[in-house]
Amino acid sequence: METASRKRGGGVFEALYKVLMRRNSVYVTFVIAGAFVGERVVDYGVHKLWEHNNVGKRFEDIPGLGQRPSEE
């Protein structure tokens, strides 16, 4: 017995295959771009988490130390 998605020509995975994995060049480009975007997202998230956990303990938060000397 076939499901309704098979009768219509495929489901999500088959559509994903048709778009991304038919040609090796498209697949490799997708993997490299995904790795780059994923790295940026993880880096941003970890940075924000670190800043949130260390508020008041950072060099910038200490009065007199984290400020640049004014040019007078």
Image (spheres, rainbow, N blue to C red):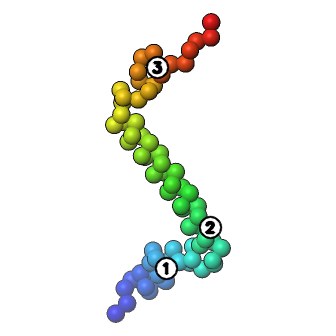
**In terms of secondary structure, where does tag 2 sit?**
helix
Query: From this viewpoint, which residue is outermost toward the bottom?
Result: 1
Nearest to N terminus: mark 2 or mark 1: 1
Nearer to me, 23 or 6: 23
x and y, in percent, of residue 69 in the image: 56, 14
Query: From this viewpoint, which residue is outermost toward the top?
Result: 72
Nearest to N terminus: mark 2 or mark 3: 2
Bin the neighbour count of mark 1 within 10 Å (Cα to Cα): few under 14, some 14-19, many 20 and up.
few
Query: From this viewpoint, which residue is outermost toward the front?
Result: 65
Q: Quadrant of residue 4?
A: bottom left
State the residue position of label 2. Answer: 29
In the image, residue 46 sits, relative to residue 35, either above or below, namely above
Q: Which residue sits at x=51%, y=55%?
A: 39
x and y, in percent, of residue 63 in the image: 42, 17
In the image, residue 55 sits, relative to residue 49, either above or below, namely above
Bin the neighbour count of mark 2 within 10 Å (Cα to Cα): few under 14, some 14-19, many 20 and up.
few
Q: Quadrant of residue 32?
A: bottom right
Q: Amino acid at mark 2?
A: Thr
Q: Amino acid at mark 1?
A: Glu
Which of the two discs, 2 and 3, sits closer to the camera?
3
Nearer to me, 16 or 63: 63
Label 2 – label 3 distance at C-alpha? 46 Å
Q: Amino acid at mark 3?
A: Leu
State the residue position of label 3. Answer: 65
